[in-house]
Image (cartoon, rainbow, N blue to C red):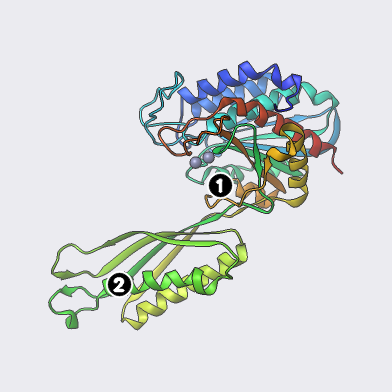
Amino acid sequence: MANISAAVEALVPKLIALRRDLHKHPELGFQEVRTAGIVADRLSRLGYAVQTGVGKTGVTGFLAGGKPGKTILLRADMDALPIQEETDVPWRSERPNVMHACGHDTHVAMALTAAEVLAKAAPSLSGNLYFVFQPAEEAASGADAMLKDGVLKSVKPDAAIAIHTLTFWPAGTLAICDGAAMASADKLEITVTGKGGHGASPERAVDPVVAAAHIITALQTLVSREAPPLEAAILSITMLRAGTAFNIIPDTVEMTGTFRCFNPELREQQMASLARTVNGIASALRCTARVTDEFVTPAVLNDPAVTAIARAVASQIVGADKVLAPQPLTGSEDAAFFWQRVPGCYAFLGAAPADGSPGVSVHNARFDIDESALPIGVEFLVQTARTLLQSS
Ligand SMILES: [Zn+2]
Ligand SMILES: [Zn+2]
């Protein structure tokens, strides 16, 4: 059994009711109007200084403790996914083709419950709380929008925490990565241009299809031959567009892909190698190439000191044997933009069925969680924030 404080335990019915209400009414990125309204209303009632419309639909809440001290940022994302829910729970989405299939409903519910517990304790706290409810995480653009609206300009947090509910591990566990927690993401767009012509007269054309095929193959050597073997990196070409008929050599080939890794220096090196490889092969085969690299989000890198505190807190709540130290996830998270600026710990809340049966993954139409995990997430946010405020 997890070690849940009386203050959190008393709010569990309200926590579950809020989570189910949010789950019934999911909203896509930058459309979180109802969700943001609930967040702003609850934070205001609890005494937080609230700002709305931060990065379109984001909300922040600031609360000063009884004595001066550090400021802790607690971040939750609010958006849902364009998925038709296929669960049969009574609180399934009432909105067609929109579903909280990534658990962000639970993140909002847990953060608001933590905000309530911490507000009650505020007179005895040394330091401040800064809640950041972020829109549009799935598009990896909400954090950037909030930063551009000045989120970290008026308030300078000393540490940041966030938690993501996942069904990779059973309810009753917390998973915390040391160092990298999630990968950086680049969106790659490559256009190879040759000279179109008749498929039967290649000597009169410059074939970009053959050049593109060589490029895709050669790009597989970036990770395998140029990255250190013990460094993780992924390069996937995922879309390919070319041609209109069986007897036409097209003018151009377009391809799209993604690059993921955990080391910013390796990313720089690999992106340089990508441009060199694409341009070199295109040139050798008489084509030209254009490479566009959109840096979607950096890696989420957990700060050692903040993470050590979070891990110690997690051990007190669920027991050291239930605090896992997984490999970093190869997915991406734009919380990274906050984590670049504030030393933080991004943790994972196990929420697969506690009986050990496998959970359904996030981003699946049948995604569902074991709600017994949620009080653990709240307790983790509350106690980690409190401990960080007390840390020297
Ligand atoms: Zn997601
Ligand atoms: Zn998510």
* Residue at (59% x, 32% y) in the render: 107
Q: Which residue is mark 2?
A: 193
Q: How far across and down, in percent of the image, does residue 85 sit?
A: 39, 29
The residue at the point 47 percent across, 71 percent down is 274
Q: Is residue 28 visible?
A: yes
Q: Is residue 64 left or right of residue 240?
A: right
> Is the CB–ligand 2 distance for label 1 below 8 Å?
yes
Vertical arrangement, residue 190 with respect to residue 41, above or below:
below
Q: Is residue 198 above or below residue 190?
A: below
Local SS, label 2: strand
Tell me if residue 156 can be seen: no
The mark closer to the camera, 1 or 2, is 1
Residue 228, position as x, y percentages in the image:
59, 70
User: Within 8 Å: ligand 1 and the Cβ of disc 2?
Assistant: no
Q: How crowded is the residue under tag 1: few (<14 C-alpha within 10 Å), some, or many (20+)?
A: many
Please say if 99 is above or below 151. above
> Residue type at mark 2?
Thr
Which residue carries the number 1 mark? 333
Quadrant occupied by the N terminus: top right
Q: Is residue 291 left or right of residue 167?
A: left
> Do the residues bearing badges 1 and 2 touch, measured as CB atoms within 8 Å?
no
Kind of residue at disc 1: Glu
User: In front here: 176 or 271?
Assistant: 176
Mark 1 or mark 2: whose residue is earlier in sequence: 2
Task: Give the structural element (helix, strand or loop) at label 1.
Answer: loop
Q: Nearer the viewer, residue 136 or 313?
A: 313
